[in-house]
Image (cartoon, rainbow, N blue to C red):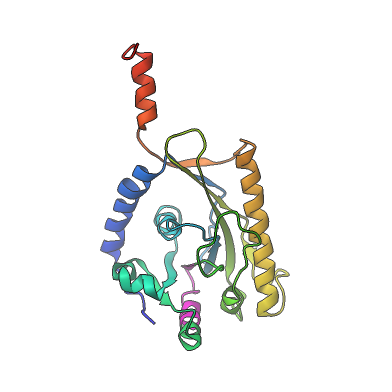
Amino acid sequence: MIRDKKSVWFSKVFHFYTTHWLLKRSFYSVNLKGTFPKTDRPLLLIANHSSWWDGLVSFYLSNECLRHESFAMMSEEGMKSYSFFRKIGAFSVNPSDSRSLLDSLNYAQTKLTTKQALWFFPQGAEQHLEKRPLEFKSGVGYLLKDKKDVLVVPLTYYYTFRHEQKPELYIHVGTAIENNSGLGGNRKEITRSLEKALTRQLEEQKEELVLEKPSEYQSLLQSGKTVSEWLQTFTLKGGIK
C-alpha cells in the first residue's frame, strides 16, 4: 500500500486552489446543513460516493469545518496517477488484493485516534447518485471493530441542477452515531445498520430538493455571476432590444 505523507504547507496551498479555482468555478453554490461534532474523539466520516468531486469536497470540508487532522482512503490506481494526494492525507487501498486490502484497513484504524478523522466511502467505488440501496462493503464494519470511542458522522452529498447555469451541491451532515449505540455486534450488522442510516438520510435530502424545500442549509461557497445572470442583467438595463 501507499501511505500518506501529509504536508501542512501543501495542504494549505491546495485548499486555496480547491476553494477558489475548482469549486467556485465549477459550482453555482456549495451548501451545508448540520454541524460537525465539537469533540476530541476520533471521527469516522462516512459519505455516499457518486462523483469524482467527492474526495475534493471532503478535503475542502476537512480544512473549512473540522478541527481534526484528517485522512482518507483512496484507490491505489488513483494514488499512482495523482501521487500528490499523499501530501493532503490520502493513502491507498486495493480491493482486488485481499492482503493489501487488509493492510489498508488496519492502517486506517491507526488513524482513528484522538483529534483525528478518517473520511471513508463505504460503497467502495463510485455508484450512480440515484442507485438504491447504497450497498456498503464490509470495510466500514471492520474499521469500527474494537473502536468504541469512535463517533460515526454520516454525510450525504447531493449534486443537482436547479435554476442556475451551473450545478449546485448540497451537503447534509447528519447526527453523529455512537459506535456502541445499537449498530450491531458484528461487522456485517454494523455495516447494514450504517447502510440503512445513510440511505435514509440521502432519500430525505433528495425529497427536500425535489420538492424545492431545501431548508436549514447555509451557503459555504457561491460562484460569481454566470453567463445567464450577466445576460439577464444586461437585458434589464436595456442592452438588448
In percent of width and height, residue 158 lies at 54, 50
In percent of width and height, residue 32 lies at 51, 46
In percent of width and height, residue 233 lies at 36, 20
Kindly identify the residue that appears in the image at 50 percent across and 80 percent down.
105
Asked whether 105 or 230 is in front, the reply is 230
**How many numbered callouts?**
0
Q: Quadrant of the C terminus?
A: top left
In percent of width and height, residue 174 lies at 61, 54
What is the residue that sits farthest to the bottom in this orientation? 99
Asked whether 63 or 50 is in front, the reply is 50
Seen in the picture, residue 217 relative to 75 is either above or below; the reply is: above
Seen in the picture, residue 75 relative to 59 is either above or below; the reply is: below
Kindly identify the residue that appears in the image at 33 percent across and 49 percent down.
22
Image: magenta residue range: 104-119
Q: Quadrant of the N terminus?
A: bottom left
Kindly identify the residue that appears in the image at 71 percent across and 78 percent down.
185
> Would you say 133 lies left or right of 94 here?
right
Kindly identify the residue that appears in the image at 50 percent across and 85 percent down.
102
> Would you say 214 lies left or right of 4 here?
right
Is 38 magenta? The answer is no
Regarding residue 91, the answer to whether it shows in the image is yes
Regarding residue 6, the answer to whether it shows in the image is no
Asked whether 125 or 196 is in front, the reply is 125
